[in-house]
Image (cartoon, grey):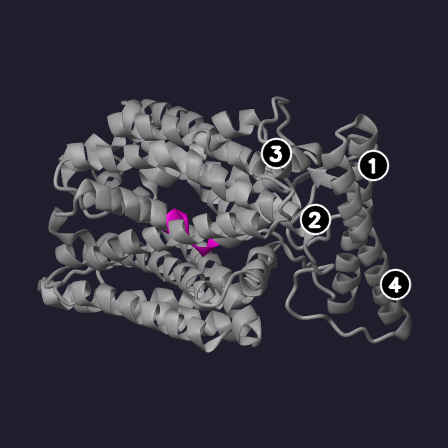
């Protein structure tokens, strides 16, 4: 980056760290540290939730996914408004009435300490792993900027975020998130504007959308019902509804936001802000990824967007790469010519020619990615490098620093909130609940900071272990889907099943988790249509595909917990009689 960009980046990060830490220093007890003394305004809470979700993961992963595939990913957010309305009438007033610290405190009174501890443990495991991905996401950007290994950038951002979070409390988190949201929206808007500015003068916005539509990049809705497909409207309305209900209603990192509200009305308004804004925001981010694809139809694009070219050990493999590069350049020019011809004369023949050329070009791209995978002996692609490449090579000096600063600061803000939630559960549900000694608030506040450091180190190690993945945004939701459905099932038993007891709830929770694990490992053989159970340590044959996609694990886990919980509760009551 240019020195001006570095200056902008350093200045903005300096302000962010100062702004967050100055609020954290005001914390005198764990209620102020974790809940800001329940004094936050509704709009700040709502924007904080939005900023946490619209983190570096959203910038990098979602835009890259739209570039590589299409806009169908937006379908999983169709359930957000419905989830927000349901939560505003159920769990939000329930939590607000009890005035608790943790989302899982309420489980002990009805189902016992074991259920509370096990449920909170599932949260710690799921968010601990998820936090590793949140740290890894902006590390891709830093790796491009600094030209250093990904592991080094993970360590830098992980340590920085941990130190910042140790000082800042939830008040600093929320107030800083609001400022990060403004910078993120500016970055998104400027990238979209700059794409339109840098396209050929003859290519209008409607032309760009026409080209994208011709290639199927604007496909956003899939009406087919197929549980083996990741994204269709039924997945978004049904399966994702359980994911969103659990995420916003039982995940401490989200619940903790509206626990800081001044009133029930404010808590509801903060969630409704997300209900109104989430789908349009995600749609726009996906559209940005599609527009990037159109931009590189006319602009110079590398065969892959990876920052480091692997070195081939064999000359023939290196020669293969040079041949693929030549083929790619020829097809890129041919596709550009086909796009221009199509815009001048929008005929079926020209559209077919444009699509066929694009398919051939993508085939060459995929061949190069496969070649790189063979060299590195690992499953890699360039989905998470696309937007960073555009920012570094196309955005003007000065603005680069501000956009990168926004991504970096958004990541810090997301990590901050997650670490704060993990520390809350560790202290409130475990240390304070199980501690036989009567300790003062200053002691627990001190250990809250120590716990934050512990989770920061663990998350950084998780980021190093996870390394790269085909889509950051997908992996986050996949990790959540292992846990969210089952946790939601326990809260369904709590709110609506009067006969449910502690034995039933705990048995149902364990059964739900076990069922989710088993169904996630069921694969279908494409040719014979036979099903097989393949354990994680076994290699999955190429001809096998998942029998059920990860989003459907959420309603599955909820259903198993509820039905097993009811059955075991009734059986237990009969045995006691």
Q: Nearer the viewer, mark 4 or mark 1?
A: 1
Q: Residue at x 53, y 47 (%)?
A: 62
Q: Which mark is residue 526?
A: none
Q: Nearer the viewer, mark 4 or mark 2?
A: 2
Say which label, 1 or 2, has the lower sequence index.
2
Where residue 126 sits in the image (x, y, percent)? Answer: 43, 51
517 or 20, nearer to the observer:
20
The residue at which mark 2 appears reads as 297
The magenta-colored residue range is 52-57
Q: Residue at x 85, y 67 (%)?
A: 322
Where residue 536 sits in the image (x, y, percent)? Answer: 64, 51
Label 1 to label 3: alpha-carbon separation? 19 Å
Say which label, 3 or 2, has the lower sequence index.
3
User: Counting other residues with Cα less than 10 Å from the Cα at mark 4, is it few (<14), some (14-19), or many (20 or more)?
Assistant: few
Report the magenta stretch's main SS: helix
The residue at which mark 4 appears reads as 323
Residue 434 lies in magenta, yes or no?
no
Which residue is the extreme one toward the front?
A: 201
Label 3 to label 2: alpha-carbon separation? 16 Å
Q: Which mark is residue 353?
A: 1
285 or 85, nearer to the observer:
285
Say which label, 4 or 1, has the lower sequence index.
4
The residue at which mark 3 appears reads as 218
- Quarter of the figure with the C terminus: top left
Q: Secondary structure at mark 1?
A: helix
Label 1 to label 2: alpha-carbon separation? 14 Å
Say which label, 4 or 3, has the lower sequence index.
3
Label 4 to label 3: alpha-carbon separation? 32 Å
Q: Residue at x 65, y 42 (%)?
A: 202
Query: Quick check: 84 above or below 13?
Result: above
Q: Secondary structure at mark 3?
A: loop
């Amino acid at each position: 980056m240019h020195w001006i960009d570095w200056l902008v980046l350093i200045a903005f990060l300096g302000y962010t760290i100062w702004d967050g830490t100055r609020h954290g220093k005001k914390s005198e007890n764990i209620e102020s540290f974790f809940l800001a003394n329940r004094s936050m305004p509704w709009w700040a809470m709502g924007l904080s939730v939005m900023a946490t979700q619209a983190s570096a993961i959203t910038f990098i992963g979602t835009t890259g996914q739209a570039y590589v595939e299409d806009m169908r990913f937006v379908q999983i957010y169709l359930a957000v408004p419905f989830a927000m309305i349901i939560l505003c009438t159920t769990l939000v007033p329930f939590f607000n009435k009890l005035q608790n610290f943790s989302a899982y405190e309420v489980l002990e009174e009805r189902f016992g300490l074991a259920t509370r501890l096990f449920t909170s443990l599932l949260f710690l495991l799921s968010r601990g792993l998820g936090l590793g991905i949140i740290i890894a996401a902006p590390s891709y950007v830093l790796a491009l900027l600094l030209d250093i290994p990904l592991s080094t950038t993970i360590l830098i951002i992980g340590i920085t975020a941990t130190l910042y979070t140790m000082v800042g409390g939830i008040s600093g988190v929320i107030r800083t998130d609001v400022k990060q949201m403004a910078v993120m929206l500016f970055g998104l808007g400027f990238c979209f504007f700059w794409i339109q500015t840098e396209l050929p003068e003859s290519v209008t916005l409607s032309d760009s959308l026409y080209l994208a539509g011709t290639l199927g990049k604007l496909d956003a809705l899939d009406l087919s019902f197929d549980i083996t497909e990741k994204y269709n409207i039924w997945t978004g309305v049904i399966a994702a509804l359980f994911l969103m209900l659990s995420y916003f209603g039982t995940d401490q990192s989200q619940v903790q936001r509206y626990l800081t509200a001044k009133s029930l009305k404010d808590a509801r308004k903060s969630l409704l802000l997300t209900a109104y804004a989430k789908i349009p925001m995600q749609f726009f981010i996906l559209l940005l990824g599609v527009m990037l694809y159109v931009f590189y139809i006319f602009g110079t694009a590398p065969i892959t967007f990876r920052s480091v070219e692997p070195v081939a050990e064999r000359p023939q493999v290196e020669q293969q790469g040079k041949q693929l590069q030549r083929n790619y350049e020829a097809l890129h020019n041919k596709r550009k010519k086909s796009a221009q011809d199509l815009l001048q004369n929008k005929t079926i023949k020209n559209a077919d020619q444009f699509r066929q050329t694009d398919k051939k070009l993508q085939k060459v791209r995929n061949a190069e990615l496969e070649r790189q995978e063979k060299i590195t002996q690992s499953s890699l692609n360039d989905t998470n490098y696309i937007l960073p490449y555009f920012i570094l090579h196309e955005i003007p000096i000065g603005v680069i620093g501000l956009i990168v600063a926004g991504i970096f600061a958004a990541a810090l803000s997301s990590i901050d909130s997650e670490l704060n939630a993990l520390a809350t559960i560790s202290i409130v549900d475990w240390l304070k609940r199980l501690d036989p000694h009567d300790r003062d608030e200053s002691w627990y506040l001190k250990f809250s900071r120590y716990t934050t450091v512990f989770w920061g180190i663990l998350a950084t190690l998780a980021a190093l272990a996870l390394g790269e993945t085909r889509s950051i945004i997908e992996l986050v939701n996949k990790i959540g889907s292992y846990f969210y459905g089952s946790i939601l099932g326990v809260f369904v038993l709590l709110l609506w099943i009067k006969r449910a007891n502690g034995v039933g709830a705990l048995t149902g929770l364990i059964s739900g988790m076990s069922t989710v694990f088993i169904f996630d490992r069921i694969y279908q053989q494409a040719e014979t249509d036979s099903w097989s159970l393949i354990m994680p340590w076994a290699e999955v044959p190429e001809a096998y595909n998942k029998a059920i996609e990860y989003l459907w694990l959420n309603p599955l886990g909820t259903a198993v917990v509820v039905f097993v919980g009811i059955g075991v509760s009734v059986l237990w009551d009969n045995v006691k009689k």
